[in-house]
Amino acid sequence: MDWKRFGFIALIIIVLFSVVVMVGQAKQPPLLIVTSMLATTIAVATPLTLGALSGVFCERSGVVNIGIEGMMLTSAFFGWLGAIYMFHIFKLPPSVSIVLGVVFAILTGALMSLLHAALSITFKVDQIIGGTVINILAVGLTGFLNRQLFFGATSVFKGSVPSSPGVLPTIHIPITELFASACGTSATCLQNVQAINRVFDQKPIAMGAVLLVFFSHYILFNTRWGLRTRAVGEHPKAADTVGINVVFMRYANVLIGGMFAGLAGAYFTIESVPSFEPLLTNGRGFISLAAMIFGNWTPIGAWAASLVFGASQALLINMQIFRDVIPPQWSFLQESYIVGLTPYILTMFILTGIIGKTTSPAADGVPYEK
Amino acid sequence: MKKLYFVMALLIVASMILSACGASAPTAADCTKEEVFCVGLVTDVGKINDKSFNQSAWEGVQKSNADGVADVVQFIETADAKDYAKNIAQFGDAGYDVIVTVGFGLGEATDAAAATYPNVRFIGVDQFQAETVAGVSGLNFPEDNAGFLVGALAAMMSKSNKIGAVCGTDVVPPVWRFGEGYKAGAAYADGMNGTTTEVFVVYHSDVGFDKTFTDPEWGAQTAKSMMDQGADAIFGCGGLTGNGAITAAAQAGAYAIGVDTDQYLTLPEAAPRMLSSAMKLITPGVADLIKATKDGSIADGNVFGAAGYAPFHDLDGEVPAEVKATMEEIKAGLLDGSITTGVPPVKP
């Protein structure tokens, strides 16, 4: 475990939160601010975490994947489209349509990654170019189909976007119910418990992402599959001599990575907002690559790095909510474009290598030639 | 290896073709003729089907086509802010008579193109003309009035006395005026009813200008964060980012307030909780100016369109009669000038 790295990440998040609490306590109780920011942080970090996990699986097996952005965008579109088709054309109940939408998104991610795998493993194409192809293809494909299906009187849905079957519901963790009795008659105590409860009341993909982080860690570092994956990413020739099928391992891990990216896509259109807009991923696939590198190609590290990006967005939102109570000597923070710089400044700060070097898998990006 | 290059080439060409389909080039070649009246529209980086701003302007152009004013209408979607000039030039070179450029972001490119194509009438939606440029008519709207109206409505309807607005970047004056108008409207309603309403206004001022209006997930998260802190009415002002906020608010059961057009009609997911929308009557504004161009009655400089608020639709029963009456009073007051928002045209 890389404690220095995690300590540094925790420190950044604590600093971000403290700044907001210091400013905002004139308006809201600190506990409410912290819990609200935590809830935002976890939700915002979800697609970044899943994207970073996608990168971890690909790159640990030796395939560079910069096409995560494109995979997310395509999955977001087809997941949403699948849900709408199931709901409107096949008349399935909304809940079933939504779940099938998630399945479609994951399959789309897998298909896109199959393309990447074929290009980079079988055809031994430069993997950066392969990823770029996927990113360009995704923008064109989703934009084109979105136009053909939904826009203009001659389109399939006659120019109106049919209402989607909705989004995944929030899962309620009954903390309030369990601890309400301990509060007795104290109203503030009950409010505090409810505020804390809000952090844990997340939607299924956000919760699933956290579980998948630890699951991925277990797979990569505690199973035979993980050992083989890392072996083909570090020294494929050595792995081959002991009888590991390098091509199969790489294909399988790139496909797993694609499914993670697909789930991240589903987050956008099936969990967060029930509609698709062209280019809606807005570079989050690339941010997740940064998170993966900062997390030193480990699932837990990548998750922690994603949380930093989530926290900086929470800061961005809350500093504006508390704009009126920012002390006059800090008045430059009232400008939305100055707080808007936070994620970028943090990224630069982080990538200066202040917490030590990150090491990529040795055979990352190198096609295997027997 | 040969096979490999073939596969790669095929893939790249296929992706290029698909991407290119996004921007359809003007087709009609007869626009150079005197008797054919052609209107071209260039969008901002938001899409033509953005369900608000670009779409309403395009509907105005289509209306002029349906009314028999324009013979040929065509649009080009801008994918990247660097392409503004190039996209305008496509219409200019094809001999179009009117080019509508939608959005504050295209202001500079429009002024530059007006010098290159002196025979073309440029209509710049949301482009405030600080100085008159020959050939350019800036179509502006009193966004602060529209924001004022929905701000007052939100303040009167809020039970928690906390309301929020999620907007695109405040670098764009119309967006800033919506936000400031919203605050002023809430303060006005407070003054009338003796309430104290807290107003959260958050702008998405990202480094990349194009991201600020096209990020529904950001809008949704911001709206949720506001609702976590007690807000129960959310005004989404800023393209797709705002749409995300509106949908998230509707899903959480808060009041959702749209922008630019009556978004009850354009966001079916949010329709049941749409309280109203701060409307800029872009569609009639654009159509009127195109007609004026054909008549020859159009002038350079600023033209002002109308603003208002959308009907309550499904929530009509929830809005008390007094609130409805007050809203009409405020609207009339803003029109005759007895109520002013106190918001300057550009951010000081």
Image (cartoon, coloured by chain):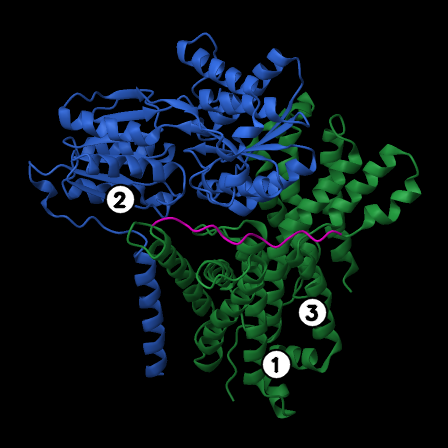
Chain colours: A green, B blue
Query: Which chain is indicated by disc 2?
Result: B
Say few, some or many: other residues with alpha carbon within 10 Å of mark 2 (under 14 / 14 to 19 / 20 or more).
many
User: Quick one: label 3, few (<14), some, or many (20+) residues within 10 Å?
Assistant: some
Q: Residue furthest top?
A: B338
Residue A48 to residue A219: above or below? above
Q: Residue furthest left?
A: B34
- x and y, in percent, of residue A22 in the image: 76, 31
| N-terminal-most mark, 1 or 3 | 3
Depth-wise, is mark 3 or mark 2 nearer the camera?
A: 2
The three-letter code of the residue at mark 1 reads Val
Q: Single out the mark in the foreground, 1 or 3.
A: 3
Q: Helix or strand or loop: what does disc 3 sit on?
A: helix
**Residues in magenta, as a range:** A159-172
Q: Is residue A166 magenta?
A: yes
Choose between A187 and A230: the one closer to the eye: A187
Provide the residue designation for mark 3: A216
Name the front one of labels 2 and 1. Answer: 2
**B271 within the magenta span:** no
Q: Residue at x 46, y 82 (%)?
A: A122
Residue A341 at least partly seen: no
Q: Are marks 3 and 2 in contact (CB under 8 Å)?
A: no
Q: Quadrant of residue A321?
A: top right
Q: Secondary structure at mark 1?
A: helix
Name the residue nearer the viewer: A310 or A142: A142
Q: Judge left or right: residue B124 versus residue A93.
A: left
What residue is shown with label 2?
B75
- Chain letter belonging to callout 1: A
